[in-house]
Amino acid sequence: MNIVRRSFTALLALGLLAGAGALRAAPLHVVASFSILGDLVRVVGGEDIVLDVLVGPGQDPHGYEAPPQAVQRLARAQVLVENGLGFETWLDRLVGASGFRGQRIVASDGVPARVLAATDDDHDADHVHGDGHAHAAGAVDPHAWQDLRNAMVYVRNIAAGLARADAAHAAAYQRRAEAYLAQLAAADMQWRARFAALPVQPCVAITAHQAFGYAADAWGIDFLSAAGLSSDAEPSAREMAALIARARRPDGIVGVFAEKGTNPRLVRQLGREAGVIAGGWLYSDALDAPDHPAGTYLGMMAWNARQLLAVFE
Ligand code: ZN
């Protein structure tokens, strides 16, 4: 009897040990809300996390409708990384439905948030994205990642949050974050120097939706858009006329840029009617496919900078 009991106890101990070992070795399961944030998390988390991105490359986070699988993916996660600043209007509902009890990291914590500019036309300011994401004048602009200096704040928050959730790998998160921060700082200095040296001012870029306010502050470019135009909304004749009038400036250079994922016909028409330079496309709220130059955050920022400089330099 004694031998049986002892063996049983030994087996139980082995089982517990194996369980504990598995728990230690298992990578942290992290969910990021959208592709741009996902890339920052991927770099900092490295091999110590399993990453799941809800709104993938080429998908619009504004109009996101979470599929049932998203609930299950979030239910399994230990950490959720979100942009904040009111960007993921759909996220709280998803968290509630999934029963997620893990740690939430708000990547934008501490960035100097800017407020969306009003347009000439009050009626423009009430445009609402498909899911009810309002880009109303006076609301906080959520697109803070469009300034590399803000992405550095994101990376610090992500590293600190991952270290809190997984203390065993804190040093690795910190090490990867430091290396990445050096790259981000170098890119920030490089591009800001190029924009500061532009020969003609002001430089005005017309885009579809109001997503580049932070880039405007960082690079000294004026961005114009019919406020909050979502990818599927057509501007009225009045809105077009207002944009064209604002684009016809006596001084400076005006370029018009399509946004990846939106219909370029609109900005081309604007370019023709306002007689301004048609530039390439810009990335606002999603990365491109992983094998594309704009498939990473740094690649996306370099792409956007080059498209703008190609017109303004
Ligand atoms: Zn947006």
Image (cartoon, rainbow, N blue to C red):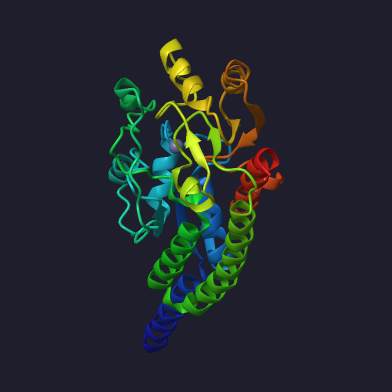
**Residue 303 located left or right of residue 27:** right
Task: From this view, report whether residue 168 is shown above or below residue 276.
Answer: below
Position of residue 1 relative to residue 229, above or below, is: below
Frontmost residue, 112 versus 153: 112
Q: Is residue 210 toward the left or the right of residue 112 in the image? A: right
Res 290 seen here = no
Asked which quadrant contains residue 105, the reply is bottom left
Is 215 displayed left or right of 276 in the figure?
A: left
* Point 50% across, 47% down: residue: 215
Q: Residue at x 54, y 65 (%)?
A: 44
Of all residues, the one furthest to the top in this rendering is 237
Q: Nearer the viewer, residue 4 or 267?
A: 267
Residue at position x 46%, y 71% from top?
Answer: 23
x and y percentages locating residue 56 in the rendered image: 54, 41
Q: Where is residue 140 in the image (x, y as percent from the top left)?
A: 32, 44
User: Against 15, is 205 above or below?
Assistant: above
Instruction: Provide residue 3's location: percent of width, then percent of height.
Output: 42, 87
In this rendered view, identify the residue nearer to me: 94 or 248: 248
Tally of marks: 0
Question: x, y percentage for residue 164?
Answer: 38, 72
Q: Which quadrant is home to the C terminus? A: top right
Give whichever of 159, 293 is nearer the camera: 293
The quadrant of the image that shows the N terminus is bottom left
- Tell me if residue 277 can be seen: yes
Indicate whether 116 appears above or below 4. above
Split into quadrants, the picture shows ligand 1 in the one at top left
Q: In this view, does 130 lie to the left or right of 291?
A: left
